[in-house]
Image: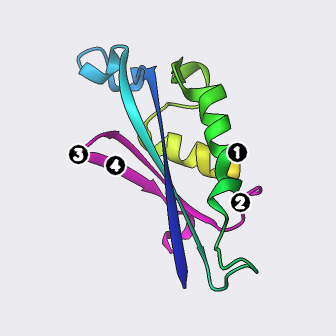
Amino acid sequence: MYKISKQFSFSASHVLSLLGAGHPCARMHGHNYVITIHLKSETLDEYGFVKDYNDLKIVKHFIDEHLDHRHLNDVIPYHPTSENIAKFLFDQFKSEIPELVAVEVSETPKTSCIYEPGGK
């Protein structure tokens, strides 16, 4: 099995209003997010790649156009936690990147979550 990953980053704000007024994340705040997409394949293409990293520019373009310096509550169709952002991005790209197996979202250098359907 071959596995590759690529990181992307963006800055954005969000409000986690479901947490209630007393929770600090219920106020508007921002993060410098790091997104890591994880791909895997049992075989390599004719060039020896799981996926040409150059073909992943679609992810950067989407992030730059729709997430960077945005208020995520206006972009993500549900409560914009790291977990939901990871699923949102996975769902956004799975059809275009069939080798995609997981999306990791980090809000801080010490925290991250991974959305991986089926837990494989």
Residue under pointer 3? 110
Amino acid beneath label 2: Ile
Question: Disc 3 on helix, strand or loop?
Answer: loop
In front: label 1 or label 3: 1
Residue under pointer 1? 58
Q: Position of residue 111 (x, y in %)?
A: 28, 46
Residue under pointer 4? 112
Amino acid beneath label 3: Lys
Contact between labelled residues 4 and 3, with CB atoms less than 8 Å apart:
no
Contact between labelled residues 4 and 1, with CB atoms less than 8 Å apart:
no
Amino acid beneath label 4: Ser
Q: Earlier in the sequence, mark 3 or mark 2?
A: 2
**How far apart are labels 3 and 2 at the CA level?**
28 Å
Q: Earlier in the sequence, mark 2 or mark 1?
A: 1
Residue interval drawn in magenta: 95-120
**How far apart are labels 1 and 4 at the CA level?**
23 Å
Query: In terms of depth relative to the viewer, which is nearer, 91 or 2?
Result: 2
